[in-house]
Amino acid sequence: MSALRLPERGRLLHIGLPKSGSTTLQQACAATRPELLAHGVLYPGDMTDHAHAGSWLAGVPLSHLGRTRARPDGWAPVLAEMRAHPDHRVLLSYEAICWTDLDQARHAAAALEGPAHGLLVLRNPGDFLVSAWQQNLKGGNGASLDGALREAFRNADTAALSRPFHRRDGLDLVTRWATALGPENLTVVVLEPAHPDRLLATAEELLGLPERLLRDATVPGGANRGLSVEEAAFLHRVNSTILREWGATPSLHRQLVFRGAVHSLVTNRRPGPDERPIRLPAWAAEPATERGDRLAAAVAATGVRVVGDPAELRRTPVTGGTDVRTLPAAIPSDVAVEALLGLYAAAAASLEEAAETPDLPRPLEAAAGRALAGALARVVRRRLTPGR
């Protein structure tokens, strides 16, 4: 038996970090939900993640849904399902749980009604910050990478990129959860490029699952991959046009661009060999490495269980930042094609939903969707690379 395996009825709370394999873990668990149950593991609900339940546990509002406070309605059905399977281990996964403070972390542990164990995934801070900035860009944030990084290093308590690393309660991320759960009840997984399956393999061990059940799961392609410089520059121009020039609402952007254009782009396309990866600017290597030193020191000081090499946290990140606010003279044609296909699909789905529920407010007017898609096509028409 693996030394990592949780006790019977153990509650495994995956708390983040964001942009650290969360989507891969969630999709694998959602795809194997019946198999998990057969092996004594409950992955509650029928959604990919537990954002609504996790929001209540952590006291973190689902701001992308326009909410200003956490609501208990997402937790009640999960708790009922857990109570209906009293002898099962349980896995709950929502990567933004790590944004919370000590008091709320203790609340989350107590609410689980069983032996609580945390799963915290860490990665090199320089790599994490670049990935977090890309995720914010996908969601419509117009801040440059340079500006967002400077704010993150200047004030971790308020910066969008530094939410997990706040010290509002006087504690660092690792110490906070080691204090809330007990260091013996927190497993830290350090992601390393050379071991891409480490998170899924560790989850299998913690939950007592057959080897490779999660690693061999069939999941959607692309998951939540990063962007190339060319893709990011294109998306930045789209965001700027739609949100700032046209004044589209954040909900319309999320509906059409994030769930449509961006989803299609990252799922159905792979950057070409000539496209550039987004790197940390050279000036940011030193403060990112300092943050990694502090993170590794906290892991060592707390005595939590560690899977992986904490030295990875201290690695000096690769640099070579590029300002994506300037659209290249040419972009690969399939960037625009996938974005447009995704946008049209999202618009069509919204209109179909509205037609099926005529008594509800229409989430998208046909004219708005057609105008947005048409204008997006005009933005990229002269930027396409012939032959791609």
Image (cartoon, rainbow, N blue to C red):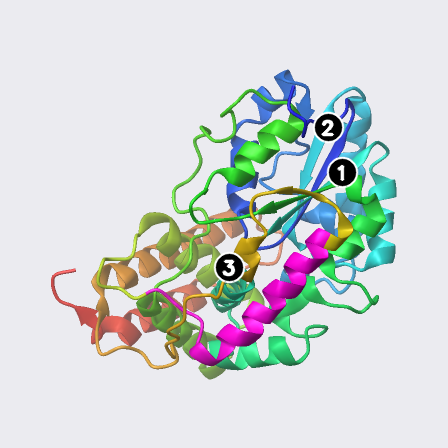
Which residue is located at x 47 percent, y 38 percent? 197
Q: Is residue 188 above or below residue 35?
A: below
Residue under numbered circle 3: 255
Residue 199 drawn at (x, y percent): 55, 40
Q: CA distance from mark 3 to mark 1?
A: 35 Å
For badge 3, the amino acid type reads Gln
Determine whether the residue tagged by mark 1 lies in a helix, strand or loop: strand
Q: Which residue is mark 2?
A: 6
Query: Dot 1: within a 10 Å radius of its alpha carbon, few (fewer than 14), some, or many (20 or more) residues?
Result: many
Q: Does residue 287 show up magenta in the picture?
A: yes
For marks 3 and 1, the one nearer the N-term is 1
- Contact, CB < 8 Å: mark 2 with mark 1? yes
Task: Tell me the CA gap for discs 2 and 3.
Answer: 39 Å
Q: Which residue is mark 1?
A: 117
Task: Characterize the magenta stretch by its predominant secondary structure.
Answer: helix
Residue name at image x 78 percent, y 25 percent: 9
- Estimate the spatial distance between the alpha carbons at disc 2 and disc 1, rounded to whole Å: 8 Å
Whole-percent x, y for residue 68 in the image? 75, 65
Q: Would residue 359 be found to the left or right of residue 11 on screen?
A: left
Query: In terms of sequence position, does the residue under pointer 2 or pointer 1 come before the other?
Result: 2
Answer with the quarter of the image where residue 39 lies. Answer: top right
Q: Please give the name of the residue rendered at 73% of the width and 26% of the height, measured from the top-left corner.
A: 89
Q: Which residues are magenta?
A: 277-300
Q: Earlier in the sequence, mark 2 or mark 3?
A: 2
Mark 3 and 1 residues: CB-CB less than 8 Å, in contact? Answer: no
Q: Secondary structure at mark 3?
A: helix
Please state which amino acid type lies under the numbered disc 2: Leu
Q: Nearer the viewer, residue 310 or 42?
A: 310
**Residue 371 falls left or right of residue 208:** left
Residue 267 among those drawn in magenta: no
Which kind of residue does numbered mark 1 sit on?
His
Specify the quadrant that holds the C terminus: bottom left
